Amino acid sequence: MLVHNWREVLKRAWSVRLMALALLFIIVEPVYTFVAATWVSRNIYIQLAMSAITGLLTVAAIIARIFVQQKISGDLNGKPPAEG
């Protein structure tokens, strides 16, 4: 079941933004591995850094998901956010 303001959540929630950034790193990592294997000597530190960044972004997204974002969540008493 979707939340009542799912479009607003997709546009403004930090958890969604961080997960999109983590997805970008997940997509870039195999592309880099392919390019590095064919053109350049592989650098294990870059691969480790990309994996670490992806993991940290995912953890940050989980943390961002549990915090209230006033523009999206509205009041703490369960009221929907104000329109506009």
Image (cartoon, grey):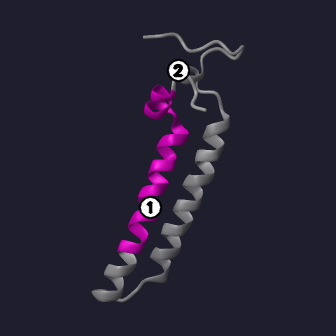
Query: On the picture, is 39 further left or further right than 81?
Result: left
User: Quick check: 44 above or below 75?
Assistant: below
The stretch of residues the image draws in magenta is 6-31
User: Quick check: 22 above or below 65?
Assistant: below
> Which amino acid, mark 1?
Phe
Q: Give the spatial CA distance, label 1 vs label 2.
A: 28 Å
Query: On the picture, is 9 further left or further right than 63?
Result: left
Q: Quadrant of residue 73?
A: top right
Residue 3 at x, y percent in the picture: 58, 27
Q: Would you name the residue on which mark 1 appears?
A: 25
SS under mark 2: helix
Which residue is the extreme one toward the left? 39
Which residue is the extreme one toward the right? 77
Question: Does the magenta stretch mainly form a helix, a strand or a loop?
Answer: helix
Q: Would you name the residue on which mark 2 appears?
A: 71
Residue 12 at x, y percent in the picture: 46, 31
Asked whether residue 12 is drawn in magenta, I would say yes
> Which amino acid, mark 2?
Lys
Foreground of the two, 79 or 61: 79
Q: Quadrant of residue 37?
A: bottom left
SS under mark 1: helix
